[in-house]
Image (cartoon, helix red, strand yellow):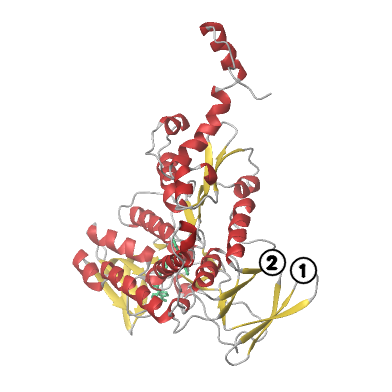
Amino acid sequence: MSNHDYDIGIIGGGSAGLTIAAGAAQFGAKTLLIDKEDKLGGDCLHYGCVPSKTLIKTAHVYHLMKNASQFGLPRHEITPVDFRAVSNRIKSVIATIQKHDSVERFCGLGAKVEFGNAVFKNEHTISLNGKDITARSWVIATGSSPAIPTVDGLEQTPFITNREVFYLDSLPKSMIVLGAGPISTEMAQAFCRLGSEVTVIQRSGRILGKEDRDMADAVMQNLASEGVKYYLNTALLSVKDLGSMREITVKLKDGTTEIIRAEAILVALGREPNLKGLGLENAGVEYDGKGLKLDSRLRTSQKHIYGAGDVTGTYQFTHAAGYEGGVVLTNAILHLPRKADYTFFPWCTYTDPELANIGMNETAAREAGLNYTVWTEEFKMNDRGLTEGEGLGRIKLMLDRKEKPLGVQILGLHAGELIGEWVAALNGGVKLSALAGAVHPYPTLAEINKRVVGNYFSGKIFSDKVKKTLKFFFSLRGRACGIE
Ligand SMILES: Cc1cc2nc3c(=O)[nH]c(=O)nc-3n(C[C@H](O)[C@H](O)[C@H](O)COP(=O)(O)OP(=O)(O)OC[C@H]3O[C@@H](n4cnc5c(N)ncnc54)[C@H](O)[C@@H]3O)c2cc1C
């Protein structure tokens, strides 16, 4: 019998912490969940996935309204966006979801929730609001924060991050977005669609660095066609506050400098783990700038202290936090050794159209030194895409040398939903022939999944060898028509 106050204590009530607390309490463990804010839900609910996807939907509707004539509808005078109303919608969606993440719900499940800053005193004890609390196992699930670069003048200039961008009082007439990762790209498109003049500053020569170049370039071209201005290979030299405007000085690829002004600066240059102030040194827990140092069972250098979610520094997504939460539960509560396995890990960037991935893309396969083949199918060949007015994008199926799937990428309308079929197929070890033989309703976007597998098989099925064999057995006589 443990003489600790709790079987498990979880620091951080976001996606990872909530998963672990709900599971542990339901398994019958005496569970404590701590968050430093006065509400549960973490970044995803308050400053991440939920507000961003709500904003993206609003921006999409406004974009459709402005482009109604493309659908054969009458043109309308469209009035400018009242961002306060947009923000109110965001808040109301959050409030609805907040009920699932309420203290009452967790108490009902059997978990005690406390608010305050937890600091480790030793490997089993934390101090919280002046009290010492012990637990047999601890989980660090404190998430991440926007990384703020050291740039001349930035500290003295008001700028926004994901914590402020969804709660602005008015729509900025112009916005400089620093960085071109998934968050920056989603926000650049959404604000551009809502009516801001958006300029993206990116140090490297491309956007969405973890995606394949062809897919990322297609996203960028689409955003540029909607009005987003890109400065690639551009270094940020300094920032200045001009009162109602902000000014940045950048160095372009050719070495010249340029001054750009905008009403708002959004800093979205990556994330850093929230590990400062936790007293990890007192508990003997090792970490570096990327996050906690963990083994494959997500244990820190202290085997009874686990890490899950953005603090792991691996895949910084809500579904990764949830998955890692499950791995921690299995190890810490059920005491069954379970390793985290990211082989067929999916993710999606919610631009319009969306860019979704599962498993390896070409960039990852090349880095791993693998031989692979790529099979593609274009959305312009998908009837449903065309009826929806969305012919942009493609699917890429990557096979290894033994013709087993390495991964799939989809750029297209609702790609995040379409990747679901591959989540099931790849994790379930479904054969490509089963996917090729399956019937999809017509017309659906998901037919593209079957078509790309069909492209792989058609080379084999309609080969000269097969044709010759059929000719021999069934006396087939060949082409009835051909273009001269
Ligand atoms: C703009 C934006 C959009 C995003 N969109 C998506 C998306 O569409 N899909 C997706 O999968 N992911 C998305 N993400 C990422 C997603 O939000 C994170 O991966 C996810 O929230 C990580 O969960 P977590 O539990 O690790 O951290 P969090 O959800 O941030 O939770 C950490 C919690 O720990 C608390 N905490 C921190 N320090 C302490 C302390 N010392 N003591 C006590 N409590 C503490 C915090 O208050 C917080 O509640 C997005 C992120 C951003 C910023």
Left or right: residue 179 versus residue 284 is right
Residue lying at 46% horizontally and 36% vertically, measured from the top left: 450
Q: Nearer the viewer, residue 28 or 437?
A: 437
395 vs 48: above or below: above
Rendering coords of residue 382 (x, y %): 49, 43
Indicate which disc, 1 or 2, sits on the residue closer to the N terminus. Answer: 2
Quarter of the image where ligand 1 sits: bottom left
SS of the residue under disc 1: loop
Which residue type carries mark 2? Leu
Q: Nearer the viewer, residue 428 or 275?
A: 428
334 vs 463: above or below: below
Q: Classify mark 2: residues with Cα within 10 Å, few (<14), some (14-19) or many (20+).
A: some
Check disc 2 and report the residue beneath it.
232
SS of the residue under disc 2: loop
Rendering coords of residue 357 (x, y %): 51, 50
Residue lying at 44% horizontally and 43% vertically, measured from the top left: 422
Quarter residue 198 falls in: bottom right
Residue lying at 24% horizontally and 56% vertically, measured from the top left: 27
Q: Residue furthest left?
A: 108
Mark drawn on residue 253: 1
Mark drawn on residue 63: none
Tell me whether the residue at label 1 lies in contact with that at label 2, contact meaning CB atoms closer than 8 angstroms. Answer: yes
Q: Nearer the viewer, residue 144 or 212?
A: 212
Residue lying at 38% horizontally and 54% vertically, measured from the top left: 327
Rendering coords of residue 76 (x, y %): 45, 70
Left or right: residue 253 versus residue 162 is right
Question: Considering the image in quadrants, where does the N terminus appear?
Answer: bottom left
Which residue type carries mark 1? Lys
Quarter residue 142 falls in: bottom left
